[in-house]
Image (tube, helix red, strand yellow):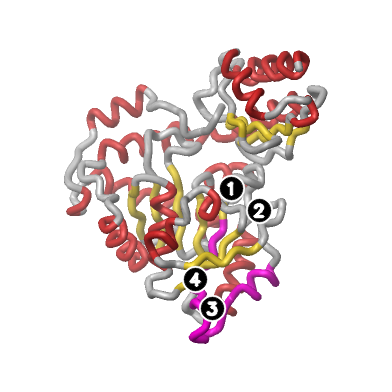
Amino acid sequence: MRSDTVTTPTAAMREAMKAAVVGDDVFGDDPTVNALQERVARLFGKEAALLVPSGTAGNLICVMAHCWDRGAEYVVGDRSHIVVYEQGGAAQFGGAHPRCVATRADGTFDEDDVRDAFRGDDPHYPRTRLVCLENTHNLCGGVALPAAYAWRMRGIVDDRGGGACGLHVDGARIWHAAEASGESLRDLAAPADSLSVCVSKGLGAPCGSLVIGSRDLVARATRLRKALGGGMRQAGVLAAAADVALDDVLPNLGRDRERAAALGRGLGAIPGVAVDDVHTNLVFADVSATGAGPDHFEAALAARGVRALAFDDRRVRFVLHHQVPKGGVDRALSAVRDIAAAV
């Protein structure tokens, strides 16, 4: 339960990978990659998609595609994955300056903060070229952002950006946002100019993400993928596994949410453990009141055969996915109960 990235390919995925018809994707002639890209673009109601190695690569490519000119800036939440976990790649490799706004507990921004973050065409300032959202939001407990909120951000982008600014969604777990909210992937994507969606997190494919947007956006993304070393040649073996994930895992994400909710309820009943609201497949348990820290719980859980993640100085994170075995929630609860009682 450390993450939904720890899954291994299913037997169906391995068979599909073995049978995949492949070509050279850098030349654009891998038929399995092309079919996956077309399928995902249709799912999200966009013109095109591009397979890239990872979610970090997808976000980096999207930010750079929007911040194409030097001296560009993107508005992003101070608790976003892009800012916290991606090594400042857009500045490091793309020369794009991040302008952070405060992230509220529900993963949204104050709309006035976003308006105020835009800079005019003044030689003293970077030019604002992008606003970035995250759905679901990792550091806010896996909360799903509704399409209505993204449309409000779209309005600000159009009003303040003068047609020169885009809206990007880090949608690594947007599949879970759609399942939890009941909104379609197409509806969640509609306000955005670009998205990066992961087929490994949540869906269980061995690796890969897709950049999604207009044909022009994906053409820029293709150039950037090449420059960043992301061309993968016979990538159809990966695309084949992603196709199986879309067929077999995506329709059952509700089970992850239900088991996460059950885990959250059980953890919250343990003395000294407080649980953040559970929205999708992420469960954050504050264990500080037990008298032991997250590192202690992580090690003690591992000794009992349960892998969780010491997330910060107070919380342990548990992530539900399709390969958490039957009885896994009860086993995790029993282990946490024993550890808390022994402190």
**Left or right for 230, reference 280:** left
**Left or right for 19, reference 277:** left
**Left or right for 121, reference 233:** right
Q: Which amino acid is tagged 1?
A: Thr
Identify the residue under disc 4: 73
Question: Is tag 2's residue or tag 3's residue first in the polypeptide sequence?
Answer: 2
Cα separation between marks 1 and 4: 23 Å
Residue 88 sits above or below residue 318 on the image: below
Q: Looking at the image, which residue is at 18% across and 50% down?
A: 29
* Label 3–label 1 contact, CB within 8 A: no
Cα separation between marks 4 and 3: 12 Å
Dot 1, how many residues are within 10 Å of its Cα: few (below 14), some (14-19), or many (20+)?
A: many
Dot 3, how many residues are within 10 Å of its Cα: few (below 14), some (14-19), or many (20+)?
A: many
Range of residues picked out in magenta: 111-133
Question: Is tag 4's residue or tag 3's residue first in the polypeptide sequence?
Answer: 4
Q: Which mark is residue 224?
A: none
Cα separation between marks 2 and 1: 8 Å
Q: Looking at the image, which residue is at 46% across and 51% down?
A: 87
Dot 2, how many residues are within 10 Å of its Cα: few (below 14), some (14-19), or many (20+)?
A: many
Identify the residue under disc 3: 161
Question: Is tag 1's residue or tag 4's residue first in the polypeptide sequence?
Answer: 4
Identify the residue under disc 1: 136
- Quadrant in the picture for the N terminus: top right
Identify the residue under disc 2: 107
Question: Is tag 4's residue or tag 2's residue first in the polypeptide sequence?
Answer: 4
